[in-house]
Amino acid sequence: MNHANAASTAHAGRWVIAPVFAVLAAAAAGAQAVPDYESIHLIRGATRDPKAEALLQASWVGGPRSIQVYRVEGSIEGLFNYYERRLGGTRDGAPDTLDMPRVGNSSVTYHLEFHAFDDQCLDATPGAAPASAGTACQRWRRGKDKKRALDGSRLSYEGGKWIEAATFTWYHREANGELQRIQVEIRDIGLSRDWKQHTPLAQLLLESVGVRSGAP
């Protein structure tokens, strides 16, 4: 596929790196054909995060799984728009595995999660038991600080709503009948622990999980 100004392509089975300005070309041309796991495009500037991969793999208890994790500097809304234009998809739908081809991909669906602005207590360390009933919180992180930090560094996606996470989901069937669930997950990781500062930074997760084997 040709991209304006420049493009980087790879043989089948390798990642394909696409420049940020390809968003504009994709918007004009419409969504691309749904890719299999090995040919999902990476936005330019994505940096592999092997430590995050190792943590996610260590806690995995399901079937066969391939996963790659990247960090991407920039607005999560821009990153979401990039993949929405490449993958297309129906919001909050369910991928149709019954009507998909014997070999190939299902349709794509996606789900959005937005930042909430409830105050939270910071007294307990991560993983610690909650304070007993009636115990006054000494340190708070405030929803108003979070909203101010987001508003100062990002444009909202929907009036007053900022994306916290977005997940694209579809299925791929091999010639031998093996079915894989493929997901592209984008998550905002740019907030400071006290919610007073925000740096445009996202985690990009590419995942393929074996669902079942055998003839469809």
Image: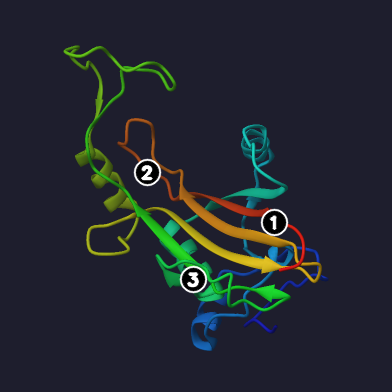
Return the residue at label 3: 84
Q: Residue 124 versus residue 175: which sits nearer the camera?
A: 175
Quadrant where the image shows the N terminus:
bottom right
Residue at the (70%, 48%) spot, across then down: 65
Question: Considering only vertical position in the picture, is 61 above or below 150?
Answer: above
Q: Where is residue 170 in the image (x, y as percent from the top left)?
A: 58, 66
CA separation in Å, label 2 and label 3: 24 Å
CA separation in Å, label 1 and label 2: 41 Å
Question: Considering only vertical position in the picture, is 135 above or below 37?
Answer: above
In the visual, does 213 lie left or right of 143?
Answer: right
In the visual, does 115 lie left or right of 43?
Answer: left
Tell me the SS state at disc 2.
loop
Quadrant where the image shows the C terminus:
bottom right
Query: Which amino acid lies under the numbered mark 3 shown in the image of this protein?
Result: Glu
Residue at the (46%, 43%) spot, across then down: 189
Q: Where is residue 147 in the image (x, y as percent from the top left)?
A: 25, 46
Of label 1 and label 2, which has the lower sequence position?
Answer: 2
**In this rendering, the label closer to the viewer, 3 or 1:** 1
**In this rendering, the label closer to the viewer, 1 or 2:** 1
Return the residue at label 1: 212
Query: Which amino acid lies under the numbered mark 1 shown in the image of this protein?
Result: Arg
In the visual, does 6 lie left or right of 155?
Answer: right
Q: Residue 172 falls in which quadrant of the image?
A: bottom right
Q: Residue furthest front?
A: 215
Of label 2 and label 3, which has the lower sequence position?
Answer: 3
Q: Where is residue 33 in the image (x, y as percent from the top left)?
A: 63, 80
Query: Which amino acid lies under the numbered mark 2 shown in the image of this protein?
Result: His
Tell me the SS state at disc 3.
helix
Tell me the SS state at disc 1.
strand
